[in-house]
Image (spheres, rainbow, N blue to C red):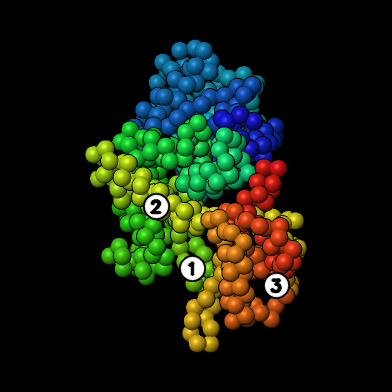
């Protein structure tokens, strides 16, 4: 596979199957900015008759004229564009009269722009589908949107929604094949699995040189990306920025976020719920509680997490050309920043079949209070469906020598002895960027699991 298109086999097969069905299927292609929706559509449209249109933030009438011009190009006849169409239904009715028997795919990219300038457009398309398209088999409609709005597919009475997510870590290295495992982790922790961002990294340069040229200069391609992304999602962006700023500073409960922002708790709760729905924010909870009653929120979109931590607070310096000072801040804080994201990669790794001695049903955070009131925690607990086998582990984004690792094991054992897990059948687990003397440690501690970059490279990249 090339750098331009990676790991969308299932999505392509899904679209191809819908295209082959003898009916007019409607598909909403949903995914955040930069995730590769357009690249997926371009690949799908190969060797198919199609009309492709990018919706503009102008007006409904201007977009209608643009569609008629795209259809004129399809027919290679400018006369189609000269027709005065009164509405969207009119242009489609005329298009159906002009076209032949072949099945045509009509794509509306950036459809949220049209939704924004015409509040009635969804009901218009629903009526078009109900009255003219639902019984046809020679058309397929695809709407690409950055965020999922409730009721989009319902308006068409059975439309499909295909969510295009970020690439998994296994595929990230395909964009960064010139980098070491550690450098790939750094990049992934800063931009996630978003193809548009990954393609911007030049692996002939160091990670820090790439951060400087992409984030820390005014003309950097990712310097203002956070603004573009948020304004794509929200019309009234102020409250969402405040909430994300609070999360980036470590405030993780609704009440603490509300106090920091100076906003009503109910308003903050609604903002956070919307951010969770969009996949920009996630939440953690004590995994053995069963239901996540007490949620602790964090920025789940790794790009926004980096942007709010290291770019937005230092704009004054970047604007006057002192991005090198910000880079020094990043150098000092990057390992602690990366360790948080590395925890989630570890959970994905631990959850995978064959990694642990049993099949994992759930993995997540765990903390408890001792009889004296002391709060203790571990980075993760994994267990099987029957709650008979457990793995309890700590994660470190650093190099551990043999002596340090032995101390980490003793410390973990001490904490477990002061928890309810001591009565369970459990393994201990130490995960680090690198564990020196790992083979000897495995011989000395047969009931302790050790994983580092060697194991991750073998698992993800073979």
Visible residue check, residue 111: no
Query: Residue at point 69% right, 55% down?
Result: 352
Q: Looking at the image, is mark 1 or mark 2 nearer the viewer?
A: 2
Visible residue check, residue 447: yes
Q: Residue 126: percent from the left, percent from the top?
A: 51, 41
Please identify the quarter of the rendering in which residue 226 is found: top left
Which one is earlier in the sequence, the residue at label 3 or at label 1?
1
- Is 5 or 199 nearer to us in this picture? 199
The circle on residue 369 is: none
Q: Is residue 228 above or below residue 434?
A: above
Q: Quadrant of the N terminus?
A: top right
Q: Label 3: which residue?
A: 426
Q: Label 2: which residue?
A: 332
**Label 3 crowd (10 A; few <14 / some 14-19 / many >=20):** some
The circle on residue 295 is: 1
Query: Residue at point 50% right, 87% down?
Result: 372
Label 1 sits on a secondary structure element that is loop
Q: Looking at the image, is mark 2 or mark 3 nearer the viewer?
A: 2
User: What whole-number distance in Å separates the C-alpha atoms at marks 3 and 1?
Assistant: 26 Å
Q: Is residue 405 above or below residue 106?
A: below
**Label 1 crowd (10 A; few <14 / some 14-19 / many >=20):** some
Label 3 sits on a secondary structure element that is strand
Which one is earlier in the sequence, the residue at label 1 or at label 2?
1
Q: Residue 17: percent from the left, percent from the top?
A: 69, 36
Q: Looking at the image, is mark 3 or mark 1 nearer the viewer?
A: 3
Q: Residue furthest bottom?
A: 371
User: What whole-number distance in Å separates the C-alpha atoms at marks 1 and 2?
Assistant: 30 Å
């Amino acid at each position: 596979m090339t750098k331009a298109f990676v790991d969308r086999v299932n999505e392509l097969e899904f679209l191809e199957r819908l295209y082959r069905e003898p009916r007019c299927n409607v598909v909403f292609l949903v995914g955040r900015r930069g995730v590769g929706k357009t690249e997926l559509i371009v690949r799908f449209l190969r060797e198919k008759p199609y009309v492709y249109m990018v919706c503009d933030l102008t007006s409904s009438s201007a977009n209608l004229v643009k569609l008629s011009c795209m259809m004129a190009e399809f027919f290679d006849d400018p006369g189609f564009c000269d027709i005065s169409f009164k509405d969207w239904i009119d242009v489609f009715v005329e298009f159906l009269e002009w076209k032949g028997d072949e099945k045509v795919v009509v794509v509306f990219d950036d459809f949220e722009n049209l939704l924004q300038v015409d509040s009635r457009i969804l009901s218009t398309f629903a009526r078009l589908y109900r009255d003219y398209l639902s019984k046809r088999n020679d058309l397929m409609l695809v709407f690409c949107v950055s965020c999922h709005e409730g009721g989009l597919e319902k308006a068409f009475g059975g439309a499909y929604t295909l969510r295009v997510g970020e690439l998994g870590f296994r595929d990230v290295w395909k964009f960064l094949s010139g980098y070491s495992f550690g450098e790939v982790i750094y990049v992934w922790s800063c931009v996630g699995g978003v193809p548009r961002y990954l393609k911007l990294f030049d692996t002939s340069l160091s990670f820090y040189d790439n951060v400087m040229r992409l984030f820390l200069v005014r003309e950097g391609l990712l310097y203002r990306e956070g603004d573009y992304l948020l304004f794509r999602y929200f019309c009234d962006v102020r409250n969402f920025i405040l909430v994300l700023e609070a999360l980036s500073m470590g405030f993780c409960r609704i009440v603490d976020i509300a106090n920091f922002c100076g906003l009503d708790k109910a308003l903050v709760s609604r903002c956070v719920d919307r951010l969770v729905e969009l996949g920009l924010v996630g939440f953690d909870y004590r995994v053995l509680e069963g239901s996540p009653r007490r949620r602790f929120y964090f920025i789940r979109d790794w790009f926004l997490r980096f942007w709010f931590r290291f770019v937005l607070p230092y704009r004054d310096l970047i604007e006057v050309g002192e991005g090198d000072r910000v880079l020094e801040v990043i150098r000092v804080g990057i390992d602690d920043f990366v360790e948080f994201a590395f925890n989630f990669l570890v959970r994905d790794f631990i959850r995978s079949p064959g990694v642990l001695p049993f099949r994992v049903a759930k993995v997540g955070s765990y903390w408890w209070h001792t009889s004296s009131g002391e709060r203790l925690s571990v980075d993760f607990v994994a267990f099987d469906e029957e709650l008979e086998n457990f793995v309890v582990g700590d994660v470190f984004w650093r190099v551990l020598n043999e002596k340090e690792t032995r101390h980490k094991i003793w410390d973990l054992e001490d904490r477990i002895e002061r928890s309810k897990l001591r009565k369970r059948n459990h393994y201990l687990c130490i995960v680090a960027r690198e564990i020196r003397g790992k083979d000897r440690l495995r011989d000395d501690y047969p009931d302790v699991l050790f994983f580092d970059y060697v194991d991750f490279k073998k698992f993800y990249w073979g």
